[in-house]
Image (cartoon, rainbow, N blue to C red):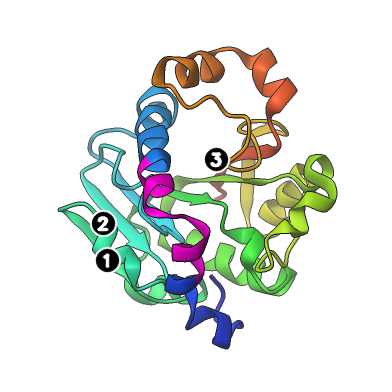
Amino acid sequence: MSEGHGELNSELDRLYAARFHDDERESKARLWRVICDEFFSRYVSGDACVVDLGAGYCDFVNNISARRRIAVDLNPDAKRFAAPGVEVHQLPLERLAEAVDHGTVDLAFASNVFEHLRGPDALLKVLANVRTVLRPGGRIMIMQPNVRLVGGAFWDFFDHTLPLSERGMTEALEVAGFRVLECRARFLPYTTKSRLPQWAFLVRLYLRFRPAQFLLGKQMLVVAERSP
């Protein structure tokens, strides 16, 4: 979350507790275990250093195997939900470089984060911080709503403030000094409450069967590399 939403930032724990009840959080965590094992693990080596940007309930960072795992989020609940061995920093993403050693991160991951930033300037500032902590050749992976596909449903969440398509996200990355390696306009459905199948074997089938993603996917997936 951006440092420009003072009153909202102070209520993040209440906001997300209301948005995701206990049973929904548990279901979402199970989904992420499958998604990390089946898909995201191919982008992360065992000796990597990984930063989860806006980690929330730590669904990604808890379920990925890496030498060093770092979660960054303003929500104080992130510390409570982080798995053993996960480092947690409670600070805005615009100050990421204050907490993480420069040039040490292999992969920065952002899931459903940048749509909460206050505007394009904040996004570029966050990307500049990410670029600072990435090693040369390090990568950023972004998954978030594609406003071109989601349309008006983007505003169903009152803390959504920065609508982006995969084209706008690509442009921002290039301006910030990244080279886009992979760009999927359609990846996962818009929310975990949508039509993504909940059973593990169906989730695996969905991730392996690209036509299903073309039909149901409303979130983009963009992978970019830090330029020299």
Q: Which mark is residue 8?
A: none
Rate crowding at label 1 as few (under 14), some (14 to 19) or many (20 or more) other CA atoms within 10 Å. many
**Helix, strand or loop under label 2:** loop
Within the magenta stretch, is there residue 120? no
Within the magenta stretch, is there residue 23? yes
Q: Which residue is disc 2 drawn over?
A: 82
State the residue at coordinates (80%, 39%).
149
**CB atoms at circles 1 and 2 under 8 Å apart?**
yes
- Horizontal relation, residue 30 to residue 186: left or right: left
Rate crowding at label 2 as few (under 14), some (14 to 19) or many (20 or more) other CA atoms within 10 Å. many
Q: Which mark is residue 79?
A: 1
**Helix, strand or loop under label 1:** helix
* Mark found first going from the N terminus, 3 or 1: 1
Query: From this viewpoint, which residue is outermost toward the bottom?
Result: 7
Q: Which mark is residue 192?
A: 3
Query: From this viewpoint, which residue is outermost toward the left?
Result: 84
Structural distance between the alpha carbons of marks 3 and 1:
22 Å
State the residue at coordinates (64%, 34%).
189
State the residue at coordinates (74%, 21%).
215
Rate crowding at label 3 as few (under 14), some (14 to 19) or many (20 or more) other CA atoms within 10 Å. some
Residue type, numbered disc 1: Lys
Residue type, numbered disc 2: Ala
What x and y, as percent, mark residue 127?
58, 62
What x and y, as percent, mark residue 171?
76, 51
When the figure is inspected, residue 195 is found, relative to residue 86, above or below; the finding is: above
46 or 211: nearer the viewer: 211
When the figure is inspected, residue 205 is found, relative to residue 162, above or below; the finding is: above
What x and y, as percent, mark residue 85?
16, 53
Q: Which residues are magenta?
A: 15-26
